[in-house]
Image (cartoon, rainbow, N blue to C red):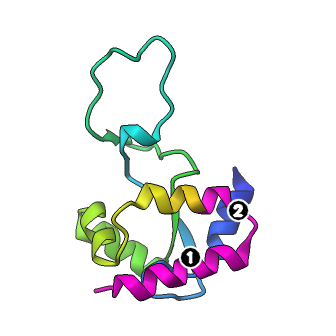
Amino acid sequence: MKSHLKFIDSLICLRCGCQNSTHHHLLRVRPEYLPKKVGEEDFLIPKIKSKGMGTKNDDRFTLPLCSKCHQMLHMCGNERYFLRCIGVSEPEEVALYLWKNTGNLEKCLKELTEIRILGGGF
């Protein structure tokens, strides 16, 4: 949903607080956050759903990062570790909170600021 991605781009960077953010699609989303497909309830599924080459996860699972912090995340090589270091232990929860509150800039900025204050960053 392009309006949600535009909204994410209007938020502060989750790590440094910079006003110039862009959306980062989570590279892996745990299965409990994904809708179950009818008829596949009994199949074994991998612990973590990875995106394939050239694909991205659903727009619901995006976080705001400035280009510098976005690059740092990819250079780190471990998205979960990077996000834990900045105080985000449940990135899917943060992304879904932003999704549910798309358009409510004040509420989302308050939440992101609290995460940044409590997380401490690198």
Crowdedness near tag 1: few (<14), some (14–19) or many (≥20) residues, C-alpha within 10 Å: some
Mark 2 or 1, closer to the camera: 1
Real-space Cα separation, disc 2 to disc 1, in angstroms: 13 Å
Crowdedness near tag 2: few (<14), some (14–19) or many (≥20) residues, C-alpha within 10 Å: some
Residue 100, image x and y in percent?
Answer: 66, 56
Q: Which type of secondary structure does the marked residue at label 2 adopt?
A: loop
- Which mark is on residue 21? none
Residue furthest to the top: 39
Q: Amino acid at mark 2?
A: Thr
Q: Which region of the structure is painted magenta?
A: 98-122
- Which mark is on residue 102? 2
Q: Which type of secondary structure does the marked residue at label 1 adopt?
A: helix
Residue 103, image x and y in percent?
Answer: 76, 66
- Residue 37 drawn in magenta: no
Where residue 11 sits, quadrant-wise, is bottom right
**Numbered-mark total:** 2
* Viewer-proximal residue among 62 and 89: 89
Q: Earlier in the sequence, mark 2 or mark 1?
A: 2
Q: Residue at x 67, y 75 (%)?
A: 107
Q: Which residue is mark 1?
A: 111
Q: Is residue 37 above or below residue 113?
A: above
Q: Residue at x 24, y 70 (%)?
A: 76
Residue 85, image x and y in percent?
Answer: 27, 76
- Residue 110 drawn in magenta: yes
Residue 102, image x and y in percent?
Answer: 70, 62
Q: Is residue 31 left or right of residue 106?
A: left
